[in-house]
Image (cartoon, grey):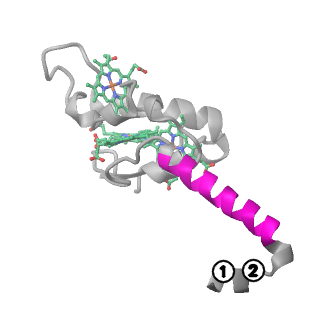
Amino acid sequence: MAVTRLVPRHAWPLFAVALAGLLTGLFGYLRADPSPAADRFYLRSAGGAVLFRHVEHQRRGVACARCHHEAPAAAARNCRGCHPAEAGEGSQEIRTLADAYHSCCNGCHLAEAPARFADAAGEPSCHACHLK
Ligand code: HEC
Ligand code: HEC
Ligand code: HEC
Ligand code: HEC
C-alpha cells in the first residue's frame, strides 16, 4: 500500500534502520524518569520572584534526587511541604525554604554553570534567579 509505494525498494534497509531508531528513542523516552506534574513554578519571596523550570534541568540530565531527597522519583514532593517559610516553625530542626533553595541550587550552578550564575567575585549572582 502507500508505504511500499512511497519508499523505493532499494531504500528499504535505510527505512528499516530509521524506523528501528525511532522506536528505540520512543521506548527510551517512555522509560525515563517520570515527568513532574508541572514544569513551571513561579516562586515568590521577599528577595524577588524566581521562575523555576523543571524542563531546563531535565534536558540537562539533572536527576530528580539532586533536588528532591526521596530516592524514588515518583515520591518527589514540593519543598514547601517540609521546609518552613520562617525559622523555628514545625517540630523538628529544619532549614527554612529559602535556605533549602539557596543551598540546593547555588552549589550546582556555581560548579556546573558559572558563566551564567556566578558574579565577578565567584559568588552567586542574585539576578540570575531573582527577577528584580
Ligand atoms: C533542579 C531541582 C529539581 C529537579 C532536578 C527536579 N525538581 Fe521537582 N521541583 C523542584 C522545585 C523547586 C519544585 C517546587 C517546589 C515548591 O513549590 O515547594 C518542584 C516540584 C515538584 C513536584 C511537586 C509539584 C507538582 O505538582 O508538580 C513534583 C511532583 C516534582 N517536582 C517532581 C519531580 C520529578 C519527577 C523530577 C525528575 C524528573 C524532578 N521533580 C526534578 C525542583 C526540582
Ligand atoms: C519530606 C520532607 C522534605 C521535603 C519534601 C524536602 N525536604 Fe529538604 N530536608 C528535609 C529534612 C528533614 C532535612 C534535614 C534538616 C535540614 O538540614 O534542614 C532536609 C535538608 C535539606 C538540605 C540540606 C541537606 C542536603 O541534603 O543538602 C537541602 C539543600 C534541602 N533539604 C533542599 C530541599 C529542596 C530543594 C526540596 C524540594 C525540591 C526539599 N528539600 C524537599 C526534608 C524535606
Ligand atoms: C544539579 C545541578 C543543578 C541544580 C541542583 C539546580 N540547577 Fe538550575 N540549572 C542547572 C544547569 C546546568 C542550568 C543551565 C545553565 C546554562 O544556561 O548553561 C540551569 C539553569 C537554571 C535556570 C535558567 C534557565 C531557566 O530556567 O530559564 C534557572 C532559573 C535555574 N536553573 C534555577 C534553579 C533553581 C531555582 C534551583 C534550585 C531549586 C536549581 N536551578 C537547581 C543545574 C542545576
Ligand atoms: C538559584 C537561584 C537563586 C539565586 C542565585 C539566589 N536566590 Fe534567593 N531565593 C531563591 C528561591 C527559589 C527562593 C525562595 C522563594 C520562595 O520563598 O518560595 C529565594 C529566596 C530569597 C529570599 C527570601 C528569604 C526569605 O526568608 O523570605 C531572599 C531575601 C533572597 N532569596 C535573596 C537572595 C540574594 C541576596 C541572592 C544573591 C546573593 C540570592 N537570593 C540568590 C533562589 C535564588
Q: Is residue 58 magenta?
A: no
**For the residue with label 2, is its CB less than 8 Å from the closest atom of ligand 1?**
no
* Residue found at x 27% / y 38%: 78
User: What is the x, y in percent for residue 95?
Assistant: 29, 22
Tell me the crowding category of disc 2: few under 14, some 14 to 19, or many 20 or more residues within 10 angstroms, Cα based. Answer: few
Q: What element carries label 2?
A: loop
Give above or below for 35 relative to 86. Answer: below
Q: In which quarter of the image is residue 73?
A: top left
**Disc on res. 34:** none
- Report if the CB atoms under discs 2 and 1 are less than 8 Å apart: yes
* Residue found at x 13% / y 21%: 90
**Disc on res. 3:** 1
User: What is the x, y in percent for residue 31?
Assistant: 49, 43
Taken as a whole, is the magenta stretch helix, strand or loop? helix
The magenta segment is: 12-30
70 and 90: which is toward the camera: 70
Left or right placement of residue 64 versus residue 46 in this view: right
Cα distance, mark 2 to mark 1? 6 Å
Tell me the crowding category of disc 1: few under 14, some 14 to 19, or many 20 or more residues within 10 angstroms, Cα based. Answer: few
Taking the image in four quarters, ligand 2 sits in the one at: top left
**Disc on res. 7:** 2
